Amino acid sequence: MRSGGLSVRKWSPAASLKLLLCCFWLFSIILPLLRMLSTIATVDVASVITARKFSRAFSHSIAASTVSTMISVVLAGILSWCVARTNIRHKTILNTLITVPMLIPSISHGMGLIIILGANGWLARLLGLTGGIYGFWGIVIGSVMYSFPVAYLMLYDVLLYEDATPYEAADVMGLKAADRFFAITFPYLRKPLISVVFAAFTMIITDYGVPLMVGGKYTTLPVMMYQDVIGMLDFGKGSVIGMILLIPALIACILDMANRDKGNAAFIGKPYTPKDNRLRDTCAILIIGFLIVLIFLPIGSFAVLGFINKYPIDMTLSLSNITQAVHMGALKYLCNSLVIASVVSVFGTALAVFNAYMTARNKTKMSYVLHLMSITSLAIPGIVLGLSYVMFFKKSPIYGTFAILFLVNSMHFFASPYLMAYNTFGKINENLEDVGSTLGIPHFLIIRDVLLPQAAGTILEMVSYFFVNCMMTISAVSFLSNVNTKPVALMITQFEGQMQLECAAFVSLLILVVNIIMKYAIFLIKKKLS
Amino acid sequence: MDKIIVENLSKAFGSSGVLHDLSFSIREGEFLSILGPSGCGKTTILRILIGLESPDSGAIYKDGKEITRLPPYQRNMGIVFQNYALFENMSVLQNVEYALLKSSSTKAEYNPSTARSKAKLMLDIVGLTDHLSKKPRELSGGQQQRVAIARTLALNPDVILFDEPMSALDVDTRLSLRSELKELQKHFGTTMVYITHDQEEAFALSDRIMVMDAGVIHQLDTPHNLIHHPADDYVKCFVIKNIDIKINSLIQYAQRREEFL
């Protein structure tokens, strides 16, 4: 018998590592999910679904999510076109500004909206509006603010990498602008657009932060699930809703995979360079400026509100909210969040890198299974994962400790960073390991000295993704944390319940600042590396 | 003297390809080309020779010793890949230095300063002295391939395998790299096995050529014998006809060019 070597054998160390990873996925995603779904067998599903309260929440969810998705994608389309297809300057800065909303929890968007357009909102008062924004339109506006940067980033990428040669051909043929749009741009955008629409829809329909804050009596499915589980400990009913929320995410995931495998790998013929057009650029700047103001209105509002004594009764500047938030444990919970975010960004990134290495650079049939398992989390909304974990891990020693929060966040946010690593590893020269083994350089040295340094930029982005998302998530963790392990973002839900908007604003601001610092640090490190 | 002897080698590869019971030998110091269309199994032979894959059955001997199950680094062979497989995060000099310092076969001989001078020497031989501190992506394709060759040569293997090393390069670069490769072989006396699907290249470089198709060897012989005594119709067609076509079109091109001028 020979040992080791890179030769293809029926059994190899790599195969057993893959088996180990598959087992890990089985226990951290597949079994918990099945545990939740198995509960449904014990529930009278028909009576849950036919209940008036449920059907109302269901139609609310569908209506609000559909409208929000449409507005969000259209706005994102306009804005991404304005940035990608014009000759305006400072595009990097614009992109950074536009994506700032991705650094705060969805519930903070809802809160920003209340500060502006709520019953006592400053703009509502200014315009003499009464009654506030609560309900359908509140959810729609909040959801658009929260989902729109994500749709923007996806569309911007698509527009940026579109091949310019068909446009040159169109110029030669003398096609009119409208014909060009329907003959070239639209067919090219169709597939990515479907992905964007489903991604945004999934994001919106599974979110409970915005509807919890501004929904009022307009209850949506995630809010109902949250109330059933947290308020009434009705896991059965929660599971039924959880299963329904899995459906759009599942469709999005399947569509995304179908699209990803075919078209997107196409190489770029020639990047698109916009022609000179003063008028177009000026219009673009106006639109971008207007939208950026809208984006920063809620953020700016809660930045101010965090330092106001008691809005709108006592408008004096004060630090009382901070003292109160600190008094209620803000610093302790901030530390919890920092611990969770740091551990998850290290552990999650390491796991994703290891996993991606096994699927992208050591391809066997088992890699494919592993790959599918690794991207399952893409199709599982946070609250569904959280509920699954409660039911599966309830009797295990990690329940109620930080460990379960590390695990659930690593799993919840796993798919995107994993895919980043998978794509990067796939692009690095396929013969590196082979050349290493023929030169007599040990495998781990090639990984450490050659492969990982080449992927350094991607790895930093992965760390940042895990960190930022752990700082702001309120979905999975809301079912799994307790007084000792609570992350700071959940204080916003708590303050909301107690109608202490000022403190909630301060906490949102805290999260935003931490995330900006993190992003900036990653930016500096990347700059130093290159 | 036979450097490498391959006996009854069989291997299933890809989705449908099979190497059928191949036996051949490679002589000490010769330049042997394996010529065949893509998918005929030539790359698989190369990967088995160096130990990146194991055969389903059969045996390989080098210098009289069986090496069939030996890991790649114990075979004292080197390989140059079509896509160079350079360490992109390291400079040209570091690429060679790193190999010398980390390779299990050379790390005992070298310290950082001797590795550096050896690396410089090798890069000088392939004509890259002016590019030592550049990163691979700043080099042309031909220059990158020279780095890969220098890195392989530095470890002093007695057999070097080339997996279609020039198919990504333009014609001029191919021509100059070709003659340099012959020079290097003369200089070091290394046995070289060269994979290509280009008849002209095989004929220009080789002492002997192995003509393959669909996992079997049609003929292994000198270029002269391939032309004058082809073993079968396949060899006649694939080798000779193709060359004829190329020569004819070149002649026609030259004539037309003269007429035009």
Image (tube, coloured by chain):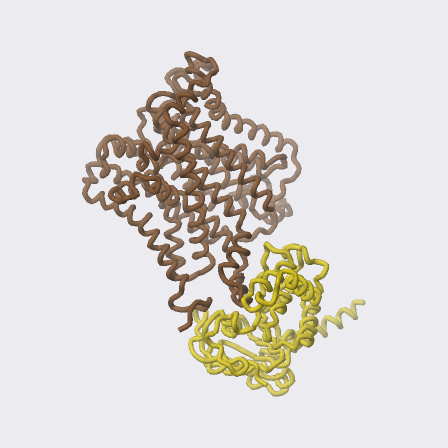
**Looking at the image, can residue A141 be seen?**
no
Going by the picture, which residue comes out furthest to the right?
Answer: B261
Give how far across and how far down residue B204 sits, in percent.
67, 76
**Residue under the point 64% across and 55% down:** B135
Query: Which residue is farthest bottom?
Result: B229
Residue at 61% x, 37% y: name it: A86
Chain B: colour as depicted? yellow
Residue B181, image quadrant: bottom right
Chain A on-screen colour: brown
Between B117 and B21, the one lying in front of the other is: B117
Measured as percent of width and height from the top left, residue A412 is found at 38, 43
Q: Between residue A467 and residue A154, name the one nearer to us.
A: A467
Residue A182 lies, with reference to residue A117, above or below; the image says below
Q: Where is residue B22 drawn, in percent x and y?
A: 49, 81
Q: Quadrant of residue A400?
A: top left
Is residue B230 placed above or below A330 in the rendered structure?
below
Q: Quadrant of the N terminus of chain A?
A: bottom left
- How many numbered discs? 0
